[in-house]
Image (cartoon, rainbow, N blue to C red):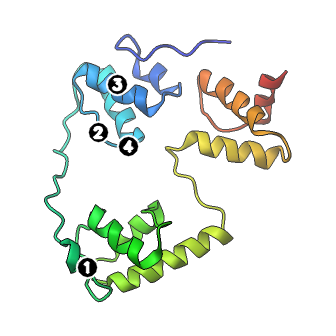
Amino acid sequence: MEERPELSTRLTSGVFRSYYYLKEELTAFCRASGLRATGGKAELTERIAWFLDHGEAPEEPAPARHGRCPAAAGELTPERRIEPDFVCSEVHRAFFRAQLGRGFSFNVAFQKWLKANAGRTYGEAVEAYRRIQEEKKRDKTAIGRQFEYNAYIRAFFEANPGRPLDEAIRCWRRKKSLPGHNRYEDADLAALE
């Protein structure tokens, strides 16, 4: 079995892209190479691939700087309108926890709803959160492409009902050490032999 190469400046972008690296590894490489180390896994991957091809950091717009949350602690009410350029803050978290209970969290679907619905009320947001939670119970949640491990494990169990998690993890570990995509295939069961 070919061993995954260490992430270094000696790699080409093609070799780099053909292996799986943890976000922590990508962030550490960016810091060590003087690249911006913020953003999601996809952004870090693109930044590193550019760097490996060109030997310099890509030109990128400066990251957005958000000032103080416009809603002070006592100002959020169900009647208040969601501000444009909504940013999840502790003030917002406290409001939603008071309305929805301690189990509240800013899940991805709810964050997207908030950002897409500026001008609607926080009361409407509370109802939207409840609907999103009900939909999650009924429907299979979409897994973002940056969450390759989660997508792999789900696909493993769909193809192999009743098999234990430790087998899925063994298959995943082998898969991510190989060049190429990281989607589940029946051939991955070879890791269990």
Give the SS element for disc 4: loop
- The residue that disc 3 covers is 28
Mark-to-mark CA distance, 3 and 1: 39 Å
Q: Going from the N terminus, do you reach mark 1 or mark 2 first?
A: 2
> Which percent across, then down, holds residue 101?
47, 73
Give the SS element for disc 3: helix
Mark-to-mark CA distance, 4 and 2: 7 Å
Q: Which class describes the residues within 10 Å of circle 1: few (<14), some (14-19), or many (20+)?
A: some
> Which percent across, then down, holds residue 72?
18, 72
Give the foreground label among 3 and 4.
3
Q: Amino acid at mark 1?
A: Leu
- Whether residues under marks 4 and 2 lie with C-beta atoms below 8 angstroms apart, the answer is no
- The residue that disc 2 covers is 38
> Which percent across, then down, holds residue 48?
34, 27
- The residue that disc 1 covers is 76
Between 119 and 127, the residue placed more toward the observer is 127
Extreme bottom residue here?
Answer: 79
Q: Going from the N terminus, do you reach mark 3 or mark 1 first?
A: 3
